[in-house]
Every structure is written in C-alpha cells, then in structure tokens.
Image: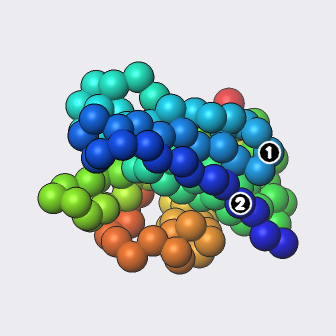
Amino acid sequence: MKRNAKAVWVGSIKEGEGNLTTESNVLNNTQYSFKTRFEDGNGTNPEELIAAAHAGCFTMQLAAYLSEGGYSIASLETKCDINFQNGNVVGSHLSVIGRVDDISTEAFQQHVKKAEENCPISKLLNTEITSNATLVQN
C-alpha cells in the first residue's frame, strides 16, 4: 500500500505560500506558509500534520492491542504535542485518555507503552517520544 500527498509552494520562504493536497482530498489545497508555521497564520504546517499522524497512528495501535487483549473500548482520545525547536523536531508527546472496561491501570499503561514504541509513526520519527495515560472507569 502506498499513500501520497502533494505540496505546491510559490514565492520566497517568508512572503510565499503553499498548499497541500492529500490523495483522499481530506486536505484539498489546504494553505500553509511561513506564518502558519512560525507565527499565527491561518492554515496548517508540517508539525501539526505530524502531530495528527502520530496521534491517529498511536491510537489505532493502542486499540489493536487492547482489542487483541479482549478489552472493550468505549473510547480512546489522544493529543499529540510536537516539539519543534531551532528547525528540528525534538520530541513528540502523546497524552491519551482511555475509557476501557475491565482493565487495570497497570495493564492499560503497559498497552500504552507498547503502542508508543510500536506504532508505525513512532518507528518513523527520529526523536524522543513520550506519553502519559489516564484511564477513566465507566
């Protein structure tokens, strides 16, 4: 399986702008620029997209591990914070809130750590990856 996205950029780095389109068209000529990356411009930026990819991938991996363990998942909600400093991604932090039936906090934490280490985006990123997890009992 292969997936693709296209970036188009016009102009200089500070005055120019670009757009991103994904194969699925979920992003369709979505604007990005110097301002959206380093200031408060309207649009997206590569780090935000990495955060979305990492949160989505990790959450699916965690759901897979929990399902394989026979647990019933009411919901998993993950926020990913990408730390971008001096032109480098220096960290990715995953914060997950899980509503999972009949699981101990310890077992939930073990599944979270396993997903953090093994989701494909975690494996792709060459940076420090950390997580914290909260289990909410229904």
Disc on the earlier residue, 1 or 2: 2
Q: Which residue is mark 2?
A: 4
Residue 70, picture quadrant: bottom right
Q: Position of residue 106 (x, y in %)?
A: 52, 61
Q: Position of residue 84 (x, y in %)?
A: 26, 54
Seen from the viewer's position, the closer of residues 128 and 22 is 22
Q: Amino acid at mark 1?
A: Ser
Residue 28, picture quadrant: top right
Q: Is residue 102 visible?
A: no
Q: Which mark is residue 1?
A: none
Q: Amino acid at mark 2?
A: Asn
Marks 1 and 2, Cα distance to the nearest angstrom?
Answer: 9 Å
Relative side of 53 to 44, left or right: right
Seen from the viewer's position, the closer of residues 68 and 13 is 13
**Considering only vertical position in the picture, is 137 above or below 40?**
below
Residue at horizontal 28 percent and vertical 35 percent from the top: 15
Q: Position of residue 121 (x, y in %)?
A: 56, 67
Q: Which residue is mark 1?
A: 24
Q: Residue furthest front?
A: 11
Q: Residue furthest left?
A: 86
